[in-house]
Amino acid sequence: MEQFFKLKERGSSVGQEARAGLTTFLAMAYIIAVNPGLMVVAGVPANAAVTATCVGAGIMTIMMGIFANRPLACASGMGINAVVAYSLTAIDGGDWHASMAVIFIEGVAILILVLCGLREAIMDAIPVPLRHAISVGLGLFIAMIGLKDGGIIVANESTMVGLGNVTSATFIVGVISIVATAILYTMEVPGSLLIGIIIAVIAGIPLGVTQMPTGIVSPLDFSSFGAPFQTDASGVMGIAKVIVNPMLLVFAFSLMMSDFFDTMGTAMAVAKQGEFLNDDGSVEDIKQILIVDSAAAAVGGFVGASSITTFVESSSGAADGGRSGLTSIVTGILFIIAAFFAPIISIISSAATCGALVIVGYLMMGDVVDIDWTNITDAFPAFMIIAGIPFTYSISDGIGFGFIAYVLINLVTGKAKNIKPLMWVATIAFVVYFLLL
């Protein structure tokens, strides 16, 4: 185990990796309740949706640990699952099998791009200041997710976003989560992020935020597996419907763009905390990470769980000491176990994970000093990424803003030679992507 995961070389231990894996799992556990709910809206049977969500996440997270040997975890991505529930299924006439076929095709397409080296090459073509900006923007995004989950910030019709109800139980649990985690982290207590989550879960019991489980064991249902190749009442396979429907193919392209750059940003965020981000902003072992992530998208469509992708919450485990794939394997095993005990795992509220995400967001702000703010050619595109990711609540949209700004500024200032060919390709793809939204 030591030789395979390189624990001593990375300054870690089995116990530290196991703790980090549990931290990551708890930070992601909300997906066990949220994703099946959306898949049921799309038409996937309830028990099948739970099984697909847990088993799909577990298998691909374990694959990430074995193949990439980095502390990243995968699960059904938020955002795309809502698209499946409320948009794709409506377009394909209510057939969720066709929706999963769109996800499957998107995953296969992006896997081909990775195997051809294009996805990694585009990452290498990104200017260093923009790489740092992605890390900072992700930090703000992660903190924003945490604050939203804790009810500390809420939607506001007048100001778009505002302070939540300070007397609400969710707000109180969110504050307890932040305060407890910050104190523990300041005191350098090992496992501070994990302990902070547990404290908040316990505090949420009398406040009614931590709900008691409705059961203990849930049955497994594999009926959604192979969804793209299953047929509806008309006897037509889901994947056959996609191939002949241009609108569904356009959706596949849009989702591919989202997956393409979301994972790039997420990998950088986790690499920053897991200490495998190089000085120039490049991520070690990025090709292996991207291969597993791309395959995960296709697997998500195949099992009926929507697109499975690398979760930015993985950074909480990395910040808690995760340095190798052993963290991922622990997280993956817990997901598979959760398939049997979903009612118990679902008691972990998103408010309880608020503190872990806010602390990770704080830690990622450090890269802001590596950007030369006196050079507007680099600084303004960097700013557009930093602002764009949290303000649009989308990693890919924020990156798109920065890429387009970088190309435009270099063009008008006569510095077009600074733009690498693949930056042109990525920027043009973003323009097309935004036009299709």
Image: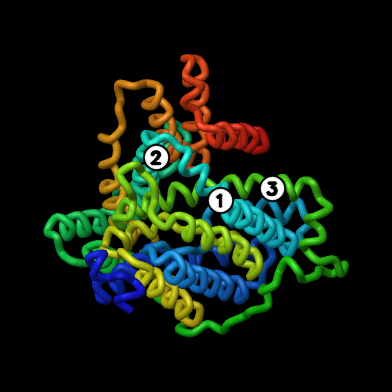
The number of discs equals: 3
Furthest-top residue in this view: 413
Q: Is residue 265 visible?
A: yes
* Residue under numbered circle 1: 117
- In percent of the image, x 51 and y 26: which residue is there? 407
Q: Amino acid at mark 3?
A: Phe
Name the residue located 54 percent from the left edge and 63 percent from the top edge: 35
Residue 231: x %, y % from top left = 80, 70
Q: Secondary structure at mark 1?
A: loop
Image location (x, y in percent) of residue 82: 59, 54
Residue corresponding to mark 3: 251
Disc 2 crowd, CA 10 A, few/some/many (<14, 14-19, 20+): many
In this picture, is 399 found above or below 227?
A: above
Judged from the image, the secondary structure of the residue bearing numbered disc 2 is helix
- Asked whether the beta carbons under mark 2 and mark 1 sit within 8 Å of each other, the answer is no
Check residue 46 in the rendering and tell me which mark sits there, or answer none.
none
Left or right placement of residue 315 versus residue 189 in this view = right
Mark 2 = which residue? Answer: 131
Residue type of the residue flagged with mark 1: Gly
Q: CA distance from mark 2 to mark 3?
A: 27 Å
